[in-house]
Image (cartoon, rainbow, N blue to C red):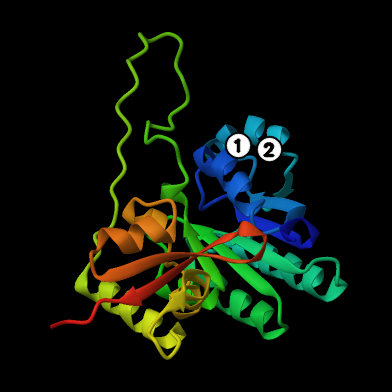
Amino acid sequence: MASDIKLAVLIDGDNIPAKYMKEMIEEIAKYGNPTIKRIYGDWTSRYQRKWKNVLLEHAITPIQQYSYTRGKNATDSAMIIDAMDILYSGEVDGFCIVSSDSDFTRLATRIRETGMKVYGLGEKKTPDPFIVACDRFIYLEILHDNDDDDEEEDNTKPQRAPRPKKQSFAKITPKVLRLMRTTVDDAADEDGWAFLGDVGSLLQKKQPNFDPRNYGFQKLTPLFSSTKEFEIETRESSGRRKLIYVKNKRKR
């Protein structure tokens, strides 16, 4: 069970906006119990004041890291040192590294070498090396409820009406479709049918940032159905549990 898996959540406060915190914590809970929650940054900076109430609400420990030298990211170094200390303590079963910074690529790779899971969370600007270094990578934009400006409220100015929610979803390109089709073939039995759960797991291994929510779907089944390229079949198993199977439609 996910609740039995203990996770260390390390957040790059200099790199991640506070507006994502609520949805991010809810997402992390799907993969395990965040027993260690730390956020790193220079809390003397005025840019970090938006984090104050968020940290109290979610019981996240702020770690102060002064910017000793301009142009040098001391926050990254502090996170990496703490991560290695936690890794060797044996207190957790996996890590959630929250950042859009490729500097954590080697850290994620090193943790995975020990057999631990690494979940990455960051914005869509995250470089590919960090994404592929994780077991799974989730874009924060697909978790966020709205895209309102995250500027602090100014009560001296008239309040504007909320802007409509804007969410831009990725298109299912021929490259993505090819990945889906080949993965179904890889997981299929002799008749071409593959259990959708196995397909999803294999897609994650091939491409850690593959997520149906990137394309506007909450689950894999509607994503596959939307392409018209697959046959979908529902089967009942023991305990009346319904299992979804998928098969490539063969071109005539």
Counting other residues with Cα less than 10 Å from the Cα at mark 2, is it few (<14), some (14-19), or many (20 or more)? some
Counting other residues with Cα less than 10 Å from the Cα at mark 1, is it few (<14), some (14-19), or many (20 or more)? some
User: Residue 181: image x %, image y %?
Assistant: 31, 78
Query: Residue beneath label 2, please?
Result: 55
Residue occupying the point 78% across, 61% down: 6
Please identify the quarter of the rendering in which residue 237 is found. bottom right
Asked whether residue 63 appears in the rendered view, the answer is: yes
In this picture, residue 59 sits left or right of residue 152: right
In this picture, residue 20 sits left or right of residue 146: right
Between 38 and 141, the one lying in front of the other is 141
Asked whether residue 71 appears in the rendered view, the answer is: no
Circle 1 sits in a helix, a strand or a loop, which is it?
Answer: helix
Residue most extreme to the left: 252
Mark 2 → mark 1, Cα distance in angstroms: 6 Å
Amino acid type at image mark 1:
Trp
* Image disc number at residue 175: none
Residue most extreme to the bottom: 190
Please identify the quarter of the rendering in which residue 127 is found. bottom left
Residue occupying the point 29% across, 70% down: 230
Residue occupying the point 71% across, 82% down: 115
User: Residue 177: image x %, image y %?
Assistant: 27, 73
Circle 2 sits in a helix, a strand or a loop, which is it?
Answer: helix
Amino acid type at image mark 2:
Leu
Residue occupying the point 65% across, 65% down: 238
* Image disc number at residue 51: 1
Relative to 197, does residue 26 appear above or below in the rendering? above
